[in-house]
Image (cartoon, rainbow, N blue to C red):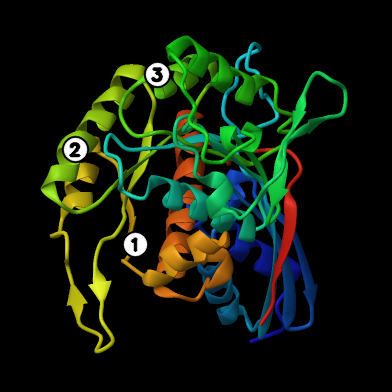
């Protein structure tokens, strides 16, 4: 076999299929550049998700495509371009590409833990993330992220969110003088506070704004669905039947509000003891039942892990404190699945011709 030529290598790479959309890079227009140096090639491509799985899959497919041509080493450089929702001209936060509601009809399922760790996992993938604590009556974000202080304003008009671990944060808990103080408000006041948290906070440019909603199917989801073009919702449940009955109601509410259900997370799924034996303390199959009812994927099953509680109480969520732990890895996999699902939803909504584009891609290089 003779030496590979730039044309033959480029043609082979044009046929490599994007791991999210399963269409050739050439037809998607996402093969950006190919540089050949003897039996080494540098490939630049654009992907629509920062997911680790997407990066690994694309690297493997590139290797497989060029190896028969005599290429010994392929360096893959990626531009991640997170697609953006179709915001209206009246949208209060047009610079936020995706708004994702984390919800459950049931209290006590660990919704805030899920929302916080998903936000951190997305941030660790290199994306720009905000986290809004929309639980006015029971804010937990200040404790879970170990952050105190009051928001300020540079111009007297817009509130500057607080930041921790590179995430922009807002919670009613930041506005209370005493963290043990109860918020005793009627519905209209709650509605007004939520509206301020969305419209009057200077969120700036974000790839994902994760909203931790309170339990139930009350005013919060309705207010947000009316004010914003939501990318979709993540439904959180635990495995047992008593939780499912309330969670089904959240799915039904999303349908009534035309909020796409992106996926389901089963929290407190199982416990693995020191001998490696798995115990399903709350039963099994609940997450899958909700996923089937919602006609959405089961993003992941997060195990019961004492470290989640310990680090959460310390103000450093498990994804930040112990990313290699079983629970930390489970949350990372959920974030990967979410990012891929968001990209796929945008792709299908646009007709499935070209890859969705967003502004300001981030360059990532995969080396071995």
C-alpha separation, residue under disc 2 versus residue under disc 3: 23 Å
Quarter of the image containing the C terminus? bottom right
Residue 154: x percent and y percent? 87, 28
Within 10 angstroms of label 1, few (less than 14), some, or many (20 or more) residues?
Answer: many
Q: Residue at x 21, y 43 (%)?
A: 290
Closer to the camera, 174 or 51? 174
Dot placed on the residue nearer the N-terminal end, 2 or 3 = 3
The residue located at (51%, 43%) in the rendering is: 343
Q: Is residue 228 visible?
A: yes
Q: Which residue is at 49% across, 36% downward?
A: 100
Q: Secondary structure at mark 2?
A: helix
Observer-nearest residue: 125 or 326?
Answer: 326
**Up/down of 186 relative to 268, above or below:** above
Dot 1: element: loop
Q: Is residue 268 above or below residue 103?
A: below
Question: For mark 3, what is the residue?
Answer: 219
Q: 15 or 274, which is in the foreground?
A: 274
**Mark carried by residue 254:** none
Question: Which label number is shown at residue 302?
Answer: 1
Q: Quadrant of the N terminus?
A: bottom right
Name the residue tied to disc 2.
Answer: 293
């Amino acid at each position: 076999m003779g030496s590979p030529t730039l044309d033959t290598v480029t043609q082979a790479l044009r046929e490599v299929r994007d791991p999210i959309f399963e269409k050739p890079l050439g037809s998607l227009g996402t093969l950006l550049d190919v540089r050949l140096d003897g039996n080494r090639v540098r490939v630049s491509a654009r992907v629509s998700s920062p997911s680790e799985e997407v990066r690994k899959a694309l690297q493997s497919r590139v290797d497989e495509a060029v190896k028969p041509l005599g290429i010994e080493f392929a360096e893959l450089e990626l531009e991640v371009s997170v697609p953006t929702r179709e915001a209206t001209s009246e949208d209060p936060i047009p610079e936020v590409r995706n708004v994702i509601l984390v919800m459950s009809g049931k209290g006590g399922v660990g919704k805030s833990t899920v929302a916080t760790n998903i936000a951190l996992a997305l941030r660790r993938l290199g994306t720009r993330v905000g986290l809004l604590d929309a639980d006015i009556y029971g804010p937990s974000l200040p404790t879970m992220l170990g952050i105190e202080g009051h928001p300020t304003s540079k111009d007297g008009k817009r509130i500057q969110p607080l930041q921790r671990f590179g995430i922009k944060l807002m919670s009613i808990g930041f506005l209370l003088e005493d963290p043990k103080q109860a918020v005793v408000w009627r519905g209209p006041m709650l509605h007004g506070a939520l509206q301020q948290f969305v419209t009057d906070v200077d969120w700036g440019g974000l790839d994902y704004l994760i909203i931790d909603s309170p339990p139930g199917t009350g005013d919060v989801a309705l207010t947000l669905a009316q004010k914003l073009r939501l990318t979709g919702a993540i439904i959180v449940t635990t495995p047992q039947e008593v939780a499912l009955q309330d969670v089904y109601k959240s799915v039904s509410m999303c349908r009534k509000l035309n909020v796409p259900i992106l996926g389901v997370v089963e929290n407190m799924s199982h416990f693995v003891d020191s001998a490696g034996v798995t115990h399903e303390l709350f039963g099994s199959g609940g997450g899958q039942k909700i996923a089937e009812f919602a006609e959405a994927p089961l993003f992941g099953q997060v195990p019961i892990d004492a470290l989640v509680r310990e680090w959460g109480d310390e103000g450093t969520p498990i994804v930040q404190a112990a990313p290699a732990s079983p629970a930390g890895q489970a949350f990372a996999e959920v974030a990967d699945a979410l990012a891929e699902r968001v990209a796929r939803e945008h792709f299908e909504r646009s007709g499935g011709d070209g890859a969705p584009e967003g502004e300001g891609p981030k360059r990532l290089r995969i080396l071995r």
